[in-house]
């Protein structure tokens, strides 16, 4: 009798443990440091743009992470009658929102959108330009000028842990210029951290990230509510309706002569 009671108790405890595992999941919160490899790749390909960017992010919970990024940009443009440069530093701050469910992300996967505010400090100028008209050729230059500008950015993307504490990912950056640092009719051709000087810009970044877990949290998993069994009254009503339909179907049709 005692053996039977002990066996029953063990079965109850195991069932409770299985229920706890199914109802929650452990999520490691992490601090990340990453670099963008797109900028150096473009520069090595022979373009006139050098862009170096890195970031640090820290998880607050399984859905939200704080983000801080900074970088340096050097842009040069030259054609037969015109030269231009823009170089400077930029800073970004915001949050990353994870749309994956905890049982899917498990602290290793991220898919969502980042919301950023960007600030840029840069120097731009035109070392030389040439203009030809009826009276001849005119050559001149414009002095370099230091400016500040800012913008907002949305960055949907995806990140996955490839190895332990090492992740790769990509993001699509959609930016809206708030203030170009100069008069609206004289915008810089290139805005460090933002891109071309238009009112909107877009870009793609590929990141390599190193992760440092600092805390674990247990997150409840939302369970689908089971369907309620039908009441006896509903079953009886359903049976009456079925019988009525059967009787109606067996009733002989009335013939008219």
Image (cartoon, rainbow, N blue to C red):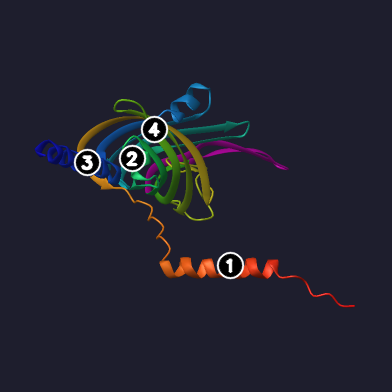
Whole-number angstrom distance, CA of label 2 to CA of label 4: 19 Å
Magenta segment boundaries in residue numbering: 117-142
Q: What residue is rendered at 57% in x and 69% in y?
A: 241
Image side of residue 38 versus residue 161, left or right: right
Which sits earlier in the primary sequence, circle 3 or circle 1? 3
Count of marks placed on residues: 4
Q: Quadrant of the C terminus?
A: bottom right
In the image, 36 versus 227, the foreground residue is: 227
Whole-number angstrom distance, CA of label 3 to CA of label 1: 47 Å
Please give the residue where the numbered disc 4 appears in the rendered image. 160
Q: Position of residue 8 (x, y in %)?
A: 18, 41
Q: Position of residue 101 (x, y in %)?
A: 37, 45
Image side of residue 184 versus residue 101, left or right: right
Please give the residue where the numbered disc 2 appears in the rendered image. 69
Q: Position of residue 61 (x, y in %)?
A: 26, 47
Q: Is residue 236 visible to the viewer in this orientation of the structure? A: yes
Whole-number angstrom distance, CA of label 4 to CA of label 1: 59 Å
Image side of residue 182 versus residue 133, left or right: left
Please give the residue where the numbered disc 1 appears in the rendered image. 243
Image side of residue 2 versus residue 136, left or right: left
Would you say residue 138 sits in the magenta stretch?
yes
Q: Quadrant of the N terminus?
A: top left
Q: In the rendered view, would you say 66 is above or below 254?
A: above
Q: Label 3: how many residues lie within 10 Å, few (<14), some (14-19) or many (20+)? A: few
Dot 3 falls on a residue whose secondary structure is helix
Whole-number angstrom distance, CA of label 1 to CA of label 2: 72 Å
Where residue 17 is drawn, which disc sits there? 3
Q: Label 2: how many residues lie within 10 Å, few (<14), some (14-19) or many (20+)? A: some
The answer to whether mark 1 and mark 2 are in CB contact below 8 A is no
Mark 4 against mark 3, which lies toward the viewer?
A: 3
Q: Position of residue 13 (x, y in %)?
A: 18, 41
């Amino acid at each position: 009798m005692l053996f039977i009671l002990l066996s029953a108790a063990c079965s109850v405890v195991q069932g409770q443990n299985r229920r706890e595992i199914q109802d929650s999941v452990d999520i490691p919160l992490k601090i990340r440091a990453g670099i963008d490899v797109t900028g150096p790749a473009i520069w090595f390909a022979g373009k006139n743009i050098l862009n170096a960017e890195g970031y640090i992010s820290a998880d607050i919970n399984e859905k939200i992470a704080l983000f801080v990024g900074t970088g340096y940009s050097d842009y040069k443009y030259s054609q037969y009658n015109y030269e231009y440069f823009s170089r400077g530093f930029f800073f970004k701050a915001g949050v990353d929102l994870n749309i994956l469910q905890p049982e899917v992300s498990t602290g290793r996967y991220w898919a969502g959108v980042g919301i950023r505010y960007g600030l840029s400090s840069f120097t731009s100028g035109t070392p030389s330009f040439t203009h030809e008209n009826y009276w001849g050729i005119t050559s001149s230059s414009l002095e370099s000028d230091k400016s500040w500008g800012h913008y907002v950015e949305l960055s949907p993307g995806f990140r996955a842990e490839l190895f332990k504490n090492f992740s790769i990912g990509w993001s699509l950056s959609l930016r809206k210029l708030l203030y170009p640092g100069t008069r609206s009719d004289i915008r810089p051709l290139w805005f460090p951290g933002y891109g071309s000087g238009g009112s909107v810009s877009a870009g793609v970044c590929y990141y390599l990230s190193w992760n440092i877990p600092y805390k674990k949290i247990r997150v409840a998993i939302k369970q689908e509510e089971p369907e309620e069994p039908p009441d006896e009254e509903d079953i009886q009503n359903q049976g009456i309706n079925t019988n009525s339909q059967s009787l109606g179907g067996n009733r002989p049709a009335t013939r008219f002569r």
